[in-house]
Amino acid sequence: MKKLLITFLIATIAWAGFGLLSPTTASAASCDDSFLGFRPWYYGITKDPDCTLKVPGVNGGNDIELSVFIWAIILNALSILFGIVGYLAIGFLIYGGFMYVMARGDPSRIAKGKNTVIRAIIGLIICILASLISSLIVNIITEATHIP
């Protein structure tokens, strides 16, 4: 059982590594590039042509209000955190499925596997909804400033 689990983990890590090393097309001056689906911490607070950060100022300073700047960074960090928790939920979903398949007819192990899968699905749904809500709020906040 341990050998099977170790083989599965090695195969998963190798598959993810090959995905990271595969060549991608480079986009010119893309401010919102993501890594593994995580958006950057500066999402929504950069200027379009040259990708420089907007300068925060008090009471509608030069480019963006300080409160909008801070809330955008906080919500971007929360979105990154929700993404990490989502990846963990997917890992627990796989683990629960593995436990269920390897239960070998033992009712307690079957119940434990089912509970793990159900809880992982609930956690994944919560993470997806939380990430969508934080993304929506960042878009609303940054679009309300009407800054190019």
Image (spheres, rainbow, N blue to C red):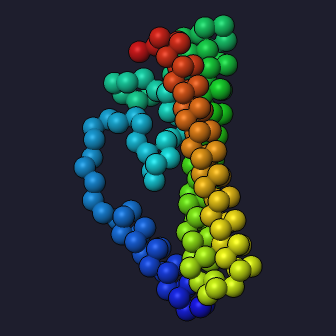
Evaluate whether residue 79 shows in this view. Answer: yes
Q: Position of residue 107 (x, y in %)?
A: 71, 80
- 27 vs 130, left or right, is left
Quick one: 46 or 94, which is closer to the camera?
94
Q: Position of residue 2 (x, y in %)?
A: 60, 90
Question: Does residue 8 sit above or below 84 in this rendering?
Answer: below
Seen at 62% across and 20% down, the residue is 68
Question: Does residue 75 sit above or below 26 in this rendering?
Answer: above
Quick one: 43 or 86, which is closer to the camera?
86
Q: Quadrant of the N terminus?
A: bottom right
Q: Residue furthest top?
A: 59
Q: Position of residue 24 (x, y in %)?
A: 28, 54
Q: Position of residue 73 (x, y in %)?
A: 61, 32
Seen at 32% across and 35% down, the residue is 29
Seen at 35% across and 36% down, the residue is 30
Count of numbered badges drawn on the protein: 0
- 146 vs 88, left or right, is left
Question: Does residue 146 sit above or below 141 in this rendering?
Answer: above
Question: Does residue 14 sit above or below 44 in this rendering?
Answer: below
